[in-house]
Every structure is written in structure tokens, then in C-alpha cells.
Amino acid sequence: MADKIKKLKFKRNAYLQLEVLPLYTLTALNKGHLVTPHRTSFYHIFLFDNCQLTHYVDFTPVKIEPYTLLFIDKDRVHQFDKLLDYQGQVLIFTEDFFCTTENDTKFLRSNILFNDLGDKPSINLSKSDFEKYTSICQSITEELSLPVDNSNHILIKNLLHNFLLLAEREKRKQGFTELKKGADLDYTLLFRDVLESNFNKLKGVNEYAKLMCLSEKRLGQATAKVLGKSPKEIINDRVLLEIKRLLVHSNLSIKEIGQELGFDDPAYFVRYFKKNTETTPVEFRERHLKK
């Protein structure tokens, strides 16, 4: 294990900040990084062809069947199946590539495919339906091979947008419970974004409400309607997820992990973790490292 969870960034020289890569190429070149837990600063869309494996997203094993799409948000911790028997391709892109307008940003952050407020991140397809998405990837690849000009970005972004819209429609057809649009969802998504930037420093609901220019009561009403959880529960969930990640995927000491997450008192940090998980940090680490 490393001192920190490795974070991979998009290639600096990739002008458009978007690529379509065959999975066999990716796994051959980056085996060491891929089979260990890592984060990325970009989005993944895996198009798994005729293969069966397990892809790990945080502490959840995702069973992959033939003709599956898997969507992974930026900054999520994930790792590849150690067998690396991956067939298909992966489409990767950055927020900078897709979000050229405010509407783009809102679409991507509230999207039911990458949004971790939803349920499972994968979609199972028939072979014929799967080929609709591989066809779009082929069009993107062809466009990427042409000399770069302003039209490339627009055309490729439109192709990606169409891909996401088709996948959203398919996910709804497969029974996804839609998050009701409106002020409550907007406030909840904003809270999630503010939380993501501040969870290692701020733990109080009042602090987040002030940053969002909302009352604590209004914030609580929004998260209760959208997620059935209080803001405090959501804060705890995010903090605990990061603690668990560092306990299992890093060599940091218990004290260092507490400090990383804004707990200056090591004893309080242990009490906080045990109160919310019914186990101590040491016990949690030992149990998961034995697996």
C-alpha cells in the first residue's frame, strides 16, 4: 500500500481531454496502477464486450456480464479485476472537455449515470443495443483521427452527449427510480458539491448551510425529500467513506488519517468512527486487509 491513494490525471498533451481506448491496450500498459485502488480526475465509460469479471468501485464489487456499460464518476476510488481479462473499450473524458457552458455542467453533475445519489452504476444490454454505443465510439474515434480544429470539439461533444442521453433513456427503461427535478434536487446536488470540497475540514450542518446561503431547516427538507437522509447523515457518510478508503488503501497511521480528515484529537476520531460503524479503525483495517 502507498501513503496515499494514487490519483491518475488525464494526459497533459491530449488536446481535447477525451479518448477512446481498447481495454486490452489499457490493461497491458497500466497493469500496476489498474489492479490497485486509484482515483482519476476524469470520467470513465466502460463498454464491456463478451467478458465476465468483477470491477470494484469503492467497497462495492460490480459484477460485469457481457455487453455491459459501466459509468464511473471522477474522483471515485476503483480498481480492476486482477485477472485483467477485459474485452471492449473505455471512453474517458474530463469535465473541462464536456462543460463548456453552465447547462453542460448542470447536466453532467445531475446525470443519473455518473450520479452517486442513484443506484448501481452499470447497464446491461443486448448485443444489438450494445452495438449502438460502440458505433458512437467508432464515430468519435474517426473524428479524433482528423486534423484538430474547432469543429472537432463540437462534433465529438455532441456525439458524447448523444451517447449519454441514449444511456439515460435505457437506464430509465430498466426501472431506474428517477430523482425528481426541482429546487430540492438542486439544493441536494449543490450540497454534495460543497461537501466534496470541504468534508475534510467542515463537519457541521450549519457551516454548509451558510456556504449555500440556506437555512439548516431548508437544507434538511431538501435532502430528506431527495435521499431520505438528513444533512448530518450525508456528511457522516462522506467522511466515513474517506476514512475507510484510507484505512484499507493507504499506509497512513490511524492518527494521520484522523488529521487528514480534520480530527485533531485521535481519541475523538476513534470514538467517532466506532459510534458510526460499531468497530474501531484498527479492527476495520485488519478485517479488510485479510480479504
Image: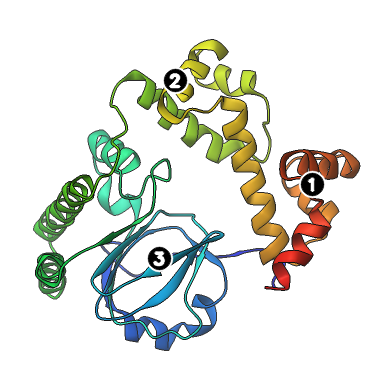
Residue farthest to the bottom, as pictured: 28
On the rendered structure, is 89 left or right of 274? left
Q: What element carries label 1?
A: helix
Quadrant in the rendering for residue 26: bottom left
Q: Which of 25 and 282 is in front in this view?
A: 282
Tell me the CA gap for discs 1 and 2. Answer: 31 Å
* Crowd rating for badge 1 (residues with CA inside 10 Å; few <14, some 14–19, many 20+): some
Query: Can you see residue 58?
Result: yes
Nearer the camera: disc 2 or disc 3 = 2
Q: Is residue 267 above or below residue 97?
A: above
Q: Residue 10: give its label.
A: 3
Q: Judge by depth and name the residue closer to the eye, 168 or 156.
A: 168
Residue 285 shown left or right of residue 46 in the figure:
right
Q: How crowded is mark 3: few (under 14 residues within 10 Å), some or many (20 or more)?
A: some
The three-letter code of the residue at mark 3 reads Phe
Q: Position of residue 135 (x, y in %)?
A: 10, 70
The answer for how far apart the CA atoms under marks 2 and 3 are is 35 Å
Which of the two discs, 3 and 1, labels the residue nearer the N terminus?
3
Q: Where is residue 283 in the image (x, y as percent from the top left)?
A: 81, 59
Secondary element type, mark 2: helix
Q: Nearer the viewer, residue 199 or 134?
A: 134
Quarter of the image where the N terminus is located: bottom right
CA distance for labels 3 and 1: 29 Å
**Residue at 33% of width from left, 86% of height from top?**
24
Residue in view at x 75 percent, y 40 percent:
262
Label number found at residue 259: 1
Q: Where is residue 52 in the image (x, y as percent from the top left)?
A: 35, 78
Which tag, 2 or 3, sits closer to the chain's start? 3
Disc 3 secondary structure class: loop
The residue wearing badge 2 is 222
Q: Nearer the viewer, mark 3 or mark 1?
A: 1
